[in-house]
Amino acid sequence: MPPTDSPADSPAAPRYRVAEPADRAALSGLMRWSFRKRPEEAERWLDWVGPDAPRVLELDGEPAASALVRPAGLFLGGRRVSTQTVAAVATDPVRRGRGAARALVEGVLREAADRGL
């Protein structure tokens, strides 16, 4: 029996990445839906965190989940320790249940480990 899915019909593997300017509308939409933000509030939030903070998890070539990642520091034993904060994790309601948030957080953790955090 032949396979039912051709490669063109198979979903693309999830892809974690830093958000790009073209993702702005999708990020704003995820924030509005997930956190009940008005459009102007979501835009102000994105302006406030800056272009380096948003991360995206793509499913099928579209942003399915997002998070805001920012550098931070704290003091332990009198020494400054570099760390990062993760906030505003959001998942597209249509894509829930497909592992997008999990893959997003795994990407954030891999990125932190690669940076020595």
Image: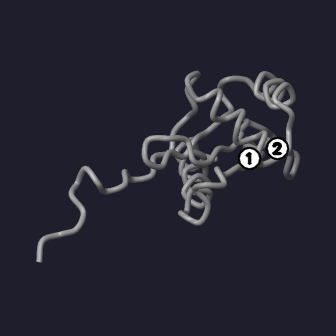
- The answer to which of marks 1 and 2 sits earlier in the sequence is 2
With respect to residue 69, does 106 lie above or below? below
Q: Position of residue 74 (x, y in %)?
A: 84, 44
Side of 30 where 18 appears, left or right: left
Q: Nearer the viewer, residue 39 or 50?
A: 39
Residue lying at 68% horizontally and 32% vertically, measured from the top left: 53
Q: Residue furthest left?
A: 1
Q: Nearer the viewer, residue 67 or 96?
A: 96
With respect to residue 94, does 83 lie above or below? above
With respect to residue 28, does 117 lie above or below? below
Mark sitting on residue 38: none
Q: Position of residue 8 (x, y in %)?
A: 25, 50
Residue type (three-letter) at the residue carrying disc 1: Val
Q: How many marks?
A: 2
Secondary structure under tag 2 reads strand
Question: Residue 115 lies in what quarter of the image?
Answer: top right
Residue lying at 61% horizontally and 48% vertically, measured from the top left: 65
Q: Nearer the viewer, residue 108 or 82?
A: 108
Residue lying at 11% horizontally and 77% vertically, measured from the top left: 1
Q: Position of residue 82 (x, y in %)?
A: 73, 41
| Crowd around label 2: few <14 · some 14–19 · many ≥20 (10 Å) | few
CA–CA distance in space, label 1 to label 2: 22 Å
Display colour scheme: one colour
* Closer mark to the observer between disc 1 and disc 2: 1
Residue type (three-letter) at the residue carrying disc 2: Arg
From the image, tell me which residue sits under label 2: 79
Secondary structure under tag 1 reads strand
From the image, tell me which residue sits under label 1: 86
Q: Nearer the viewer, residue 53 or 112?
A: 53
Question: Residue 81 lies in what quarter of the image?
Answer: top right
Q: Position of residue 95 (x, y in %)?
A: 57, 56
